Amino acid sequence: MFDIQDYVVYRNEVCFIKEIRKRFIGGKDYYVLSPSSDSSLTIHLPIDEHIRLKPIMTKQEAMNFIKSIPSILPIACNDKTLESEYKALLRTEEKKDLVRIIKTTYFRNQERLKAGRRVGEKDETYFNKAEKLLYNELAVSLGMNFEETKEFVIHTIRHM
């Protein structure tokens, strides 16, 4: 069971537990979650469904994950099925799958730019979504803000 003021991950989204409401709806106890990406939102989640909540990575787990990023491969599939692959990877709620999306979209857009074409809209959308989800959790784990985390991850990977 989690406590008030804990950070947790719910469906890939980093959330802060604002309160625990006893016998709130239907006599059940509920977590009241506030997503870190939008503190104006509130999520009510029955405590007995806490299986869907995961603890946030520790600082050491975050550092180990960052060190593993170079070994994570981009997606290997054709253009026709790529968007469905992006969606499927987002649903896994695995951080390595977010990296796979980021790498794939980044490399595809770099190729487009080299060819004098514009960045792909779908690739850009999935890149931003995956990046937001990944760096939000790493930021909390590392005690940094989003931009600091992004710079730290890129710097760390480049100097490995």
Image (cartoon, rainbow, N blue to C red):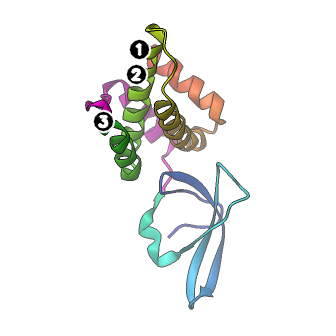
Which element type, helix, strand or loop, lies under badge 2?
helix
Residue ID at (44%, 16%): 112
Whether pointer 1 and pointer 3 mark residues with C-beta atoms closer than 8 Å, the reply is no
Look at the image and give the residue range highlighted in magenta. Answer: 55-79
Whether pointer 2 and pointer 3 mark residues with C-beta atoms closer than 8 Å, the reply is no
Q: Could you tell me how far apart the alpha carbons at marks 1 and 2 are, in whole angstroms?
A: 5 Å
Which amino acid, by three-letter code, is at mark 3?
Lys
Whether pointer 1 and pointer 2 mark residues with C-beta atoms closer than 8 Å, the reply is yes
Q: Name the residue under label 1.
A: 111
- Residue 37 in percent (x, y) is at 65, 48
Instruction: Name the side, left or right, on which 97 lies relative to 9.
Output: left
Residue ID at (40%, 20%): 107
- Verify whether residue 57 appears in magenta: yes
Which amino acid, by three-letter code, is at mark 1?
Glu
- Residue 27 in percent (x, y) is at 57, 91
Examine the rendering and report whether any part of residue 4 can be seen: yes
Which amino acid, by three-letter code, is at mark 2?
Arg
Q: Which comes sooner in the sequence, label 1 or label 3?
A: 3
Q: Nearer the viewer, residue 92 or 18?
A: 92
Q: How many marks?
A: 3
- Residue 118 in percent (x, y) is at 52, 18
Q: Quadrant of the C terminus?
A: top left
Q: Name the residue under label 2.
A: 108
Q: Residue 80 carries which label?
A: 3
- Residue 25 in percent (x, y) is at 60, 86
Q: Which of 46 and 82 is in front in this view?
A: 82
Residue ID at (38%, 40%): 83
